[in-house]
Amino acid sequence: MDSLPENLTDGFDRLPDPVILTIFNYISDIKTLIRCRAVSRRFNSLVPQTDSLLLRVDRVISSVDSDDDGDTSSVIGFIKSIVKSIQYLISPPQGHTLHSSSNRNQSQSQYSPAMILRGFDRIKELQIELPTGDLRLEKRAGIKWKAEFGKTLKSCVILGFRCDGVGESDLGGGGGLKTRVVWTISALIAASARHYMVKEIVKEHLHLSKLVVRDREDEGTVIMNEPGINEFREDKGENLDEEEGQNGAINGIWWRSNRTRVPAVWMRMRHEAKLDLSDGVTMDGATLVVVRPTAEEAEEEHRCDEGLVVSGRGFDGVYGEAVAKLINRRSYLLEMNSF
């Protein structure tokens, strides 16, 4: 009978804190970890020390109050308003209307990624998963993009393609060049909006060394590695002043104007009307665009294209194969001013 109390003890009580933290890091999902805090006092004290997290977001709402807007605040919404003059974008914002200032403030506290993450104080690696992609392109077109940021855009790789049954003539004049430029601008706006969304998180979590923002549709990904995060923190405010200067530009509504300014860039474009891939797969209108700031010389930028894709800015599966084939095609260089 003396051994009975020991047999009835919780097995977790025998595990040292580092082992439990390792388990929490494998769990990573913030909603699950928040529930774990209710299990015991020990779990409640250890969960905030988890350093590898996944935040699945149903809606994106600013942590800054906005009394001028009664609409749902979302990445999709503010990207839509920024590019409303471009005809090939953006789906309507998701969610419901917030009817009062008090309800809006309550939702902001509940749904802002920055607010949620303030319950964790040792984050090193963070993934944020948005509910949907940001772009809805017409003519049954598809797009995949990956962008790397520091204080501003460092590089972006964009793969565009057409779905079955869409001919080259359906893409408009100039052999579809105008539409491909729209694809590129759309992806850059979406990327810069996501970057702006996480700037508060980067400022507040000083242990953070890697940040990835993606969506459940796997349309686009923003990456901030440790050098980029450090560059962002060391920025003396020059780029931030430009961002803040956009606030309120459109009816004073934060999500209609706030995004990181895209610098002047080189856009090196490669296109193949019909790209044959393995297993009998054919990709129509395949277009690869590699974007880099014009601070790099055009020749240097060209030499870095292949290395950029190989080093992890490419894509998996059939999309990765398409990128690997397109990178060797003839390229065209375009220059675009900051916007």
Image: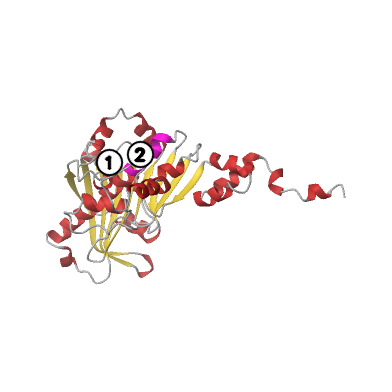
Q: Residue at x 37, y 59 (%)?
A: 217
**Would residue 103 be found to the left or right of residue 303 on screen?**
right
Residue 263 spot, x, y in % from top left: 23, 39
Q: Which numbered dot is residue 260?
A: 1
Q: Residues within 10 Å of mark 2 (few under 14, many from 20)?
A: some
Q: Residue at x 41, y 42 (%)?
A: 114
Provide the secondary structure element on which disc 1 rests.
loop
- The answer to if 136 sits in the magenta stretch is no
Q: Is residue 129 visible?
A: yes
Residue 205 spot, x, y in % from top left: 44, 36
Which residue is disc 2 drawn over? 199
Q: Amino acid at mark 1?
A: Thr
**Would residue 266 be found to the left or right of residue 75 on screen?**
left
Query: Which sits in the foreground, 31 or 21?
Result: 31
The boundaries of the magenta stretch are: 196-204
Q: Quadrant of residue 89?
A: bottom left
Q: Which numbered dot is residue 128?
A: none
**Would residue 193 be found to the left or right of residue 333 on screen?**
right
Q: Residue at x 64, y 40 (%)?
A: 17
Residue situated furthest left in the rendering: 173
Query: Which sits in the foreground, 188 or 100?
Result: 100
Above/below status of 221 relative to 16: below
Q: Earlier in the sequence, mark 1 or mark 2?
A: 2
For the residues labelled 1 and 2, the Cα–Cα distance comes to 9 Å
Check contact, mark 1 vs mark 2: CB within 8 A: yes
